[in-house]
Amino acid sequence: MPKFVEWIGLVAGIVMILAVSGSMMRALIVPRGLSTKLGATVGLVVRKAFITVANRFESYETKDKILALQAPTFLLVLLLSWLVGYWLAWGLTLWPFSDITFANALRESGSAMLTLGFEQPENPNTFWIHFGAAASGLVVIALQIAYLPTLYGSFNRRETQVTVLQSRAGSPAWGPEILARHAMTGLVPDLPHFYAEWERWAADVAETHTNYVVLLYFRSPHALRSWLIALLAVMDSAAMYSALSPSSAPVQARLMLRMGFTCLRNIATVSGVPYDPDPMPDDPIELSFEEFEGSMGRLEEMDFPIERTAEEAWPHFVGWRVNYESIAYRLADMIVAPPAPWSGPRTHLPDLAIVPQRPANRRPGNPRAEVPHQDRIEWRA
């Protein structure tokens, strides 16, 4: 092998070391959502692979179980990509300083990176390269180990609130269902506290999910729960409350809406999802007036306090929803969220919509109340 080829390899190795180090630093150390070409490439390949496998099954539950492995697999593949990148880079760096083949240089760099010690340096003067290789291997593993508790701590905080919402919003969550269940159980006065909690939750998600974008793809333990569907449902309930009952709607509902669409916009920015940062209140939305009007029956059935008719409330509801609908729909399609009502279409869940599951309202006078009928969830292409 000509010597100049080995020196070209040295330059390539140094560039690779800098590139891998930069990718790792942006992904694990810098506390903001900085994308890297390596991370984006790995994420795209892993996502396409899992979507391809999931599309081979008809059952929604099976598809959800498959997609639940997507985010953990991405983390493992990204870790291996960093290790392989360092391995090749240190091998190229060692190559011109020792009278050995590139294959033997890779053996030396691999032995040094994993601190195995089975390969002794051919040139004692290359000890600094071996030290660098050993340090890089330890740093990658140590950072990844330290990264996981932070990641799963954020995931657990997110999912605790989503799980609590199930009794208030059904599964999957739906905005009108939140208002109806609060009215049914006499908890309408608790809604200000409810919206204040979700304002803080949205702020936490805005912070964690822009710093650690992989959290977007971590699915809930239950197939019909989703952080995005939960946020959309709470925002829809706040928008409906403000539009239907302007004199009694709490200010916390408006604050939650503001924090909610700020959260979605921050996530859309780091995810590359386009959106209008300043939509007009009368811009069109995808949700139809007929769908909005249809939900009024559920609220009237539970005696929710209503001050406006559906026709009067609709322009006000649109003025709120136009701020977040398009982002929520695109993100829901991107992460293949459960197809709840009012959450938009799914490219990989065609013609599938799941209504919230409602428990039987059994009481001493009616102990055998029937459980509301729920069709078995099927994937309908």
Image: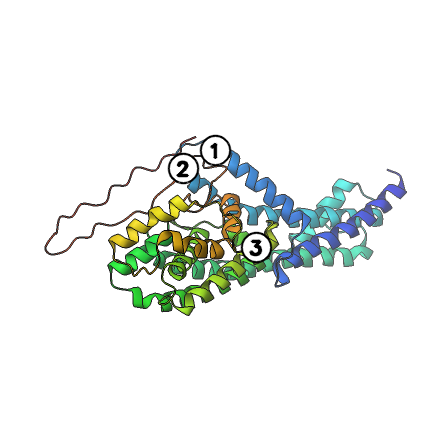
- Assign a secondary structure to mark 1: loop
Q: Which three-letter amino acid code belongs to the residue tagged 1? A: Asn
Q: Is residue 266 left or right of residue 154?
A: right
Q: Are marks 2 and 1 in contact (CB under 8 Å)?
A: no
Residue drawn at 28 percent across, 59 percent down: 304
Which tag, 3 or 2, sits closer to the chain's start?
3
Q: Please rate how many residues cluster around mark 1, counting C-alpha atoms within 10 Å: few if below 14, some from 14 to 19, many from 20.
A: some
> Mark 2: which amino acid?
Leu
Residue placed under numbered mark 2 in the picture: 352
Foreground tag (3 vs 2): 3
Cα gap from disc 3 to disc 2, whole angstroms: 29 Å
Residue at image position (44%, 62%) is 157
The residue lying toward the viewer, choosing from 196 and 112, is: 196
Query: In the image, residue 235 lies at what x, y percent?
Result: 43, 57
Image quarter of residue 371: top left
Amino acid at dot 3 = Pro
Percent x, y of residue 368: 13, 48
> Which label lies toward us, 1 or 3?
3
User: How crowded is the residue under tag 3: few (<14 C-alpha within 10 Å), some, or many (20+)?
Assistant: few
Q: What element does badge 2 sit on? A: loop
Residue 302, picture quadrant: bottom left
Q: Residue at x 82, y 57 (%)?
A: 125
Residue identified by numbered label 1? 55
Report how far apart the C-alphas of labels 1 and 3 lie in the structure.
35 Å
In which quadrant is the N terminus drawn? top right
Which of discs 2 and 1 lies nearer the camera? The answer is 2
Q: Which mark is residue 279?
A: 3
Label 2 Cα neighbours within 10 Å, binned few <14 / some 14-19 / many ≥20: some
Q: Are marks 3 and 2 in contact (CB under 8 Å)?
A: no
Disc 1 to disc 3: CB gap under 8 Å:
no
